[in-house]
Image (cartoon, rainbow, N blue to C red):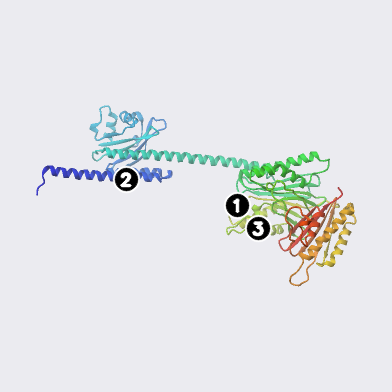
Amino acid sequence: MRLWPPRRRLLRELREARREVETFFRLETLVHDITTRFINLTSEKYDAVINNLLQDIGRFIGIDRAYLAIIGSGRKSFSITHEWRAQGIEAIDASLKSFAVNTFTWWRRNLFAQEYVCIPSIGELPPEAKAERRFMSLGGIQSMLLLPLIRKDLFDGFLGFDAVRSRKVWDKKEIYLLESVAQDIVNLRLRWEAERELREAEVQLVRMREEDLETSARIQRAILTIDPSIDNPAADIAALTISSQEVDGDFYNAMKISGDAFDVLSGDVMGKGLPGAFIAAAVRNHFLQVKLDMAMCQPKGILPGPGHIVNEVASRITPELIHLESFVALTYSRFNVRARRLDFVDCGHTPVIHFHGDTERCWRLKGRGTPLGFLEDEAYHEQSAAFREGDIFFFYSDGISEARNQRGDFFGEQRLVAVIEQNHEKPARDLNRAVKDAVIGFCEGNPLADDFTCVAVKLRGLPAGRGLRQGRIFPGDVSCLADARCFVEECFAGGHAAGLSAEERAKTILAVNEAVSNIIAHGLSREDGEEPSGFNLEVATGPGWLSVCFLYGGRPFVLPKPGPLRIEDMKEHGYGIFIMEEFMDSIIYADDMRGGRMIAMAKRFGS
């Protein structure tokens, strides 16, 4: 059966229309896929995506060359930045990849008017397009389509397609979809440039921050962490700090007070970086200012004690620290080398490690104060400890004890004590280095999570003739109470203790009696039925002060809570501690981490 001619024509038109719709649908799908790729694109892949886009579009619409041209910053020239060509098609001549805007006036007029340029054949070019005709002839281009790139309402370049092997008829729907691709390229360029500018700004910001941090670190090294130098032949002092960042919140200072005394300040601000360093500088400055103010108000020759200085500083800065939601842990210490006495105030800092040169054991001296910035009405109290020739006092931040290895284990105080005991004969500087090497070796390459700071004070060549120390070992039995009291009385019989008033003497003897009773009853008690070991009692006296120290092995005291003791709060067996705290100016409860216990009581008199 033969079809009627009009019907055959109608079927042919239907098939062509169907192919056209299918082609348009596939092109639309490709454009959607390209748009989706742009949405998830990172700027680092910009060039690769543009090249793939030109290839996919060129192959799909059946042209031989696709390229992207961008107008320069001066808007006087074009540069072809990306090009794809079909197999066997020559690339655009290098001399034509960059050309002046005025080279092709007909193209320029249409493109700058934000209209596309469609050239089905060279013969359809207008007479004024002489340069364009010559360009297409030299390149063997039969058909061309140029789509303007519009960026912020300004012409920014064009997307070009060349048909070389045969002519190409451009469908308006096809051109419409390709215009959307051109706009996607504009958006991609905007993203790429914004991200590039952001990266450059970030690099510049990092560079500026590094420069600021390096400047801050130099200032900190010059002001906050300068190596202490005290002109005192009896003291070898050295400090070492390693920041977990460029700058940190650790600080220290050493200052000569008189020919016989010097102060050491060691502190740690909550937080690291510049905020911590600023607070550290402010706190250190407050201490210097308070010492100066108090020295000006005191009679000549009378020095304000560490307790007075710390309380005055706390009253000035605690409200501000609370407002800043920060706090400062510190230890303020005064060394009197002639009297052989350390007076210190602990404000929630790590324990001071006291290495005894005679026994070669370390004791942890710890107060009960809270850091500055915790409580506005906190009252800080001095504590005192006697020292001898060859003793070492080691101040450190928790960046040392809390350093971790790869398994998460802490370096801890026990390892620190072992390093100090093994290196106690070295100069202070070398002792600090030994601690540093031990911590870094323990961390196994794990970075320090907190700032590392230590100050070592090694006492040697102490002046003679001002301090007197006597000691005796007593059995761990109540029968020794009378002998212990008599021994202390004998130590007070002459020398510096002769200045003790009758009341001060009686209170001291009573405090000693209560301490011995508590040690025997609680510290030395044995649950295995064996005879408890004894204790060592040492009495040291100096100008205007005395110290009574008990050394024993056994259980530690169950200490009262921090703060003033009230007799009405005491339970059974608690009166002894109340008497000791009430009658003595300072009491230190310490241990040597091996089961050794120490109670050191001190009293000032004659003032």
Amino acid type at circle 1 is Ala
Q: Between label 3 and label 2, give the one nearer the viewer.
A: 2
Residue 23, located in which quarter of the rendered image? top left
Tell me whether the residue at label 3 lies in contact with that at label 2, contact meaning CB atoms closer than 8 angstroms: no
SS at circle 2: helix
Amino acid type at circle 3 is Gly
Tell me if I can see residue 140 in this picture: no
Q: Mark 3 points at which residue?
A: 412
Residue 449's label in the rendered image is 1
Taking the image as shown, residue 259 lies to the left or right of residue 207, namely right
Residue furthest to the top: 128
Q: Between label 1 and label 2, give the one nearer the viewer.
A: 2
Residue furthest to the left: 1
Tell me whether the residue at label 1 lies in contact with that at label 2, contact meaning CB atoms closer than 8 angstroms: no
Q: Position of residue 361 (x, y in %)?
A: 74, 60
Amino acid type at circle 2 is Leu
Q: Name the residue under label 2.
A: 30
